[in-house]
Image (spheres, rainbow, N blue to C red):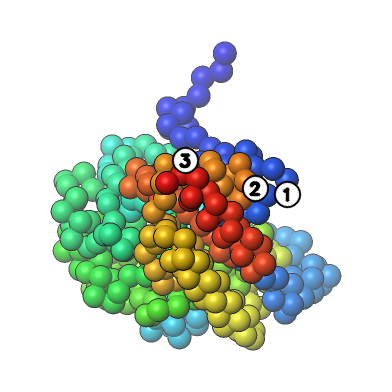
Amino acid sequence: MPNFSDRVERISISGIREVFEAAGDDAINLGLGQPDFPTPDHARRAAVDAIEDGKADAYTENKGTRSLREAIAEKHRADQGVDLDPGDVIATAGGSEALHVALEAHVDAGDEVLIPDPGFVSYDALTKLTGAEPVPVPLRDDLTIDPAAIEAAITDDTAAFVVNSPGNPTGAVSAEADVREFARIADEHDVLCVSDEVYEYTVFDGEHYSPIEFAETDSVVVVNSASKLFSMTGWRLGWVYGSEERVDRMLRVHQYAQACASAPAQYAAEAALRGDRGVVGEMTASFERRRDLLLDSFDDIGIDCPTPQGAFYAMPRVPEGFVDECLDRGVVVVPGEAFGEGGRGHARISYATDESDLREALDVMAAAYEATT
């Protein structure tokens, strides 16, 4: 009988995947975090050109091509006003690897990492894979991350805390005052703030702010990705950035785990960053329309749901049995407890799906709600 590491035995396949596997082939899937827009043509073309020109046949630099990292740096200078050196950027295999290298490079076994509860499933699992302990921090009633709750949870063992805005699974967007507090807390307590900003462009109400805009030390590392910004989930191209010293350590992890991100994906992401951004506004407007449709229908049904201000998720409060009832009726929604104990009594719904399917699913949810109340 083979022996397995304690670290891997502490994690399991996510509850999201379990729901998918229980659904029928013809189910309406409101569980998948996948924009229903194609990757921009100019990004696809750049990858094809790179392949045909032989530029994608070899390894790139470990950090990624210089031209991609320059495009990423230009994006963050324009969007956050951050004076980012391209040398302090690592192109990764999606935002998932960016999160992984950030935690591996900064967290030791026995340390604590504060994570939002409910929060993205990877925060808990990736922390456990480092040998550290995830410490769930409850959200406010409106599902935003509370800086005071983070500060109160810090102990001598705290190595890092994770913030995510716009949020998955909540759709919540942190206010500027809260983001300033995240930066202050990281600075004053000398703990790392890992800021997951992969839904940065999908904001309906308010604005996106990054803790790195306000930090006075090198206490913030930012994770981002082309996946949700440009509907490029399958390309697996993300990035992580921070101070030179932090990037040096993250690069050591990335170098041995990945060597470099996919070369064709790097050329595609560079084109997306430098090219026409029309698709970004189109996606955001479409998701906002669907959000409003969802909230109006929830109001008619009697389902209570904090208003999502970004991303393309809603997290309504639902009665016991609601998720299973939806699944039995052919609509996939994810139980809130898949994202932490704080999600119990909620369901996560992704409205990044065709509006006609969304309307049909809402009829099913109305029936499921009636059957469980």
Residue at x-position 44% and y-position 82%: 79
How far apart are labels 2 and 3 at the CA level? 14 Å
| Residue assigned mark 2 | 330
| Residue assigned mark 3 | 321
> Disc 2 or 3, which lies upstream in sequence?
3
Residue 206's place in the image compared with 126, above or below, is below
Element type at marker 2?
A: loop
Task: Say if residue 61 shows up in the picture.
Answer: no
Element type at marker 3?
A: loop
Q: x and y percent of residue 246 in the render?
A: 37, 60
What is the number of callouts on the image? 3
Q: Residues within 10 Å of mark 3 (few under 14, many from 20)?
A: some
How far apart are labels 2 and 1 at the CA level? 7 Å
| Residue assigned mark 1 | 26
Q: Is residue 329 left or right of residue 248?
A: right
Q: Is residue 76 left or right of residue 360?
A: left
Residue 346's place in the image compared with 92, above or below, is above
